[in-house]
Image (cartoon, rainbow, N blue to C red):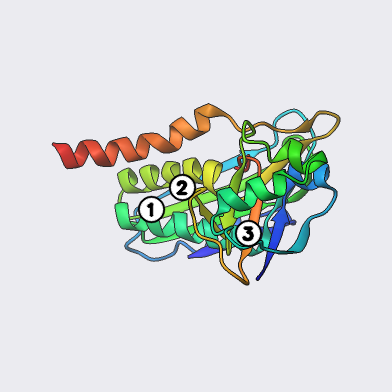
Amino acid sequence: MKVTVRYFASLREAIGKDAEEIELPSGISTVARLRSHLSSRGGAYGEVLAERKLVRSAVNQDMVKPTAAVKAGDEVAFFPPVTGG
Amino acid sequence: MKISVQREPFDLGSEMRVFSDPRIGAVALFVGQVREVAMTLEHYPAMTEKAIRGIVEEARGRWQVMDCTVIHRFGELQPADPIVLVAVASAHRGDAFAACEFIMDYLKTQAPFWKKEAGKGWVEAKASDDAAAEKWNDLVLNKKRS
């Protein structure tokens, strides 16, 4: 099953792309697990998605907790804490 | 109700003209502007308006809000450029002030915008912004308790 992953701000710059479509390995059903799956790629992914880093996420354009479910066709976004206003 | 995420500047005079309902007795209006350093504001287009709409709906549930305008800019901005406008119209000032501050506090922690300062890099989120948004939850809890 496929999901679209989007990156913003410092994560987008470090990873070098703003979006990608990835095939979800079985057993990856939450945002937190998707994050650690991506982080295990190492390099920039390992750096910016490391557990010690403050990363926020959204599923289908709603801000969610790491325990939120991820399913086929979802758009999952990872980004640093927001700084608008 | 108007929500706009835009590159262009906004004009306070024309934004005020929509609040012509004779039952409106107060308009609280906040403008945030770029302080000291030029910056670029990035956002998450598909999510931004939805997030702001959610914040405004929450405010409408808490206070008597007759009309509301939120404009947030993105792109390249210079010092003293206005970034954000929150205008809340109500019958009385108490609701207008409170809802305006609430919307601003939540924009700071919930709306997907990121500032990058020229020559300095990405702006770090402030713990004080989280605390400002949190205080509204405490208020509700305190009300429920009393």
10 Å neighbourhood of mark 1: few (<14), some, or many (≥20)? Answer: many
Residue at the disc numbered 1: B59
Tell me: B44 left or right of A58. Answer: right
**Where residue A83 sits: x, y (%)?**
63, 39
Q: What is the number of callouts on the image?
A: 3
Residue at the disc numbered 3: A76
**Which quarter of the image is occupied by the C terminus of chain B?**
top left
Which of these two is toward me, B55 or B8?
B55
Spatial CA distance of label 1 from label 2 is 7 Å
Spatial CA distance of label 2 from label 3 is 25 Å
Q: Amino acid at mark 2?
A: Ile
Residue at the disc numbered 2: B103
Residue drawn at the location 39% of the way across and 47% of the way down: B99
Q: Secondary structure at mark 3?
A: strand
Q: Secondary structure at mark 2?
A: helix
Reading the chain from its start, which is encountered first: label 1 or label 2?
Answer: 1
